[in-house]
Structure formats: structure tokens, C-alpha cells
Amino acid sequence: MLIAVFVALWAYTDTVSALSRDEIGSGHWTIALFVSFAPWIALAVGGISLALVNQKLEPLVKASKEVKPLLDLSKSPFEEFMGVPVSTVDLPFAYALATSKEILISRFAVDHLSKDELDAVLWHELCHVREKHFALKRLARLILALSPILAASRALVQEIEILVEIAADNFALKRVSSPTLTLARSLFTS
């Protein structure tokens, strides 16, 4: 931003000196005057863009700051799976989530899955952690938040959601059988 202000001030002083050298009746001074406004317009567009981005993102940041402490209070350590901490959350339904550093799974899912099915879910979620799918999905949602009227933004979010799930399933299928993964998935889709 400091560079933009410097460029705008330089353009202004350059225009003033150009205007003082030329006669007002010549065509050159109008071009110089027009060009001198370009950095100011760019600065205004940049400032407005930053304000709009901040306005769109503030509710997301606020919600995240409110939810994280509540989530931290409600989770309890369960085990470590392939070097990644796994915590349970008391929820009355099947739920599993991979954040950037850990795997969260509902107590309901732990209680209703067999050992093999639980392993299938953990392998699936481990892929999300290792491949940083959480960050990729967050970036896609950020793009959607900044440009919600563009169909491409909505399509990007949908495609990324589908592709990371396919990648995680393929990762899990290298370690567990297809019927086991299908049975585990059925608890989450019913």
C-alpha cells in the first residue's frame, strides 16, 4: 500500500511539472492529466476491494473463533493413529472430521463400528490430514465466500469436496477391504 501511495504522489508531481512545461491548449497535457489519475484510481479500487474482502470474511473468522473453544472443551483424547491424535466428541450421530492436525470422531461412531470399520474410517481421515485436504477445502470455501455469484466458485467447492473424498477412499482401500469401507461408510450416510 505504501508503494501505491508513493506511485500516486510521484504521478501527481510528474503531472504538475508536465503541465507547467506545456501550454494548456496543446493535446499533450490532457493525456498527462488522465495518466496521473490512474494510480489514484488503482489505489481506490484496491482499498475498496480490501474492504469488501474484510466484510465477507469477518463473519467466518468470528464464527471460527467461537466454535473452536467449544469444540476443544467437548473433545476427549481417544488414541493416536499412525502418529496423528484421534479425539472423540460426544455426538448422538456418526461423525468424523479431519482437521489440519487431528482426527475427530463421534463417540456414537466409535461405539457402533467394528474394529475393522473404525480402522477404515481412521485410514480415510488420515488421508485428509496427510494430504492437507482441510486447507484445500478451506481455500475453496474462501474463494466461494469472495465470489458467491460465480457458478465456477460453487462448482470448485463441489468438485474439491468430491475429489478429496475419492482420494481418501482410495487411500483407505489400500489398507482395508472394500466391503469394510462400504459398511463403515453406511453408518455415516444413514
Image (tube, helix red, strand yellow):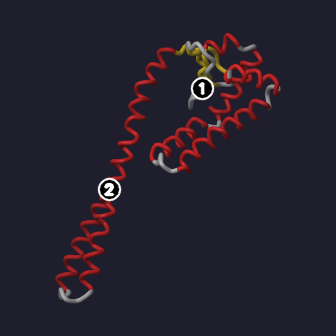
Which residue corresponds to the image point at 75% horizontal and 30% vertical from the top-left?
172
Task: Identify which residue is drawn at 31% across, 69% down.
Answer: 38
Q: Nearer the viewer, residue 152 or 166?
A: 152
Frontmost residue, 174 versus 162 = 162
| Quarter of image, res 131 | top right
* Circles 1 and 2: CB atoms closer than 8 Å: no
Q: Quarter of the image containing the C terminus?
A: top right
The span from disc 1 to disc 2 (Cα, nearest Å) is: 39 Å
Q: Residue furthest top?
A: 111
> Which SS class for mark 2?
loop
The answer to whether 27 is drawn above or below residue 42 in the figure is: below
Q: Is residue 67 left or right of residue 118?
A: left
- Label 1: which secondary element: strand
Label 2 Cα neighbours within 10 Å, binned few <14 / some 14-19 / many ≥20: few
Give the residue number, with chain letter if any, for mark 1.
97
Q: Is residue 126 above or below residue 88?
A: below
Residue 161: image quadrant is top right
Please, is residue 32 above or below residue 52 in the view? below
Vertical placement of 108 versus 180: above or below?
above
Could you tell me the amino acid type at mark 1?
Leu
Disc 2 marks which residue? 1
- Mark sitting on residue 188: none
Q: How many marks?
A: 2
Does residue 30 appear to the left or right of 121 in the view shown?
A: left
Q: Residue at x 56, y 29 (%)?
A: 99
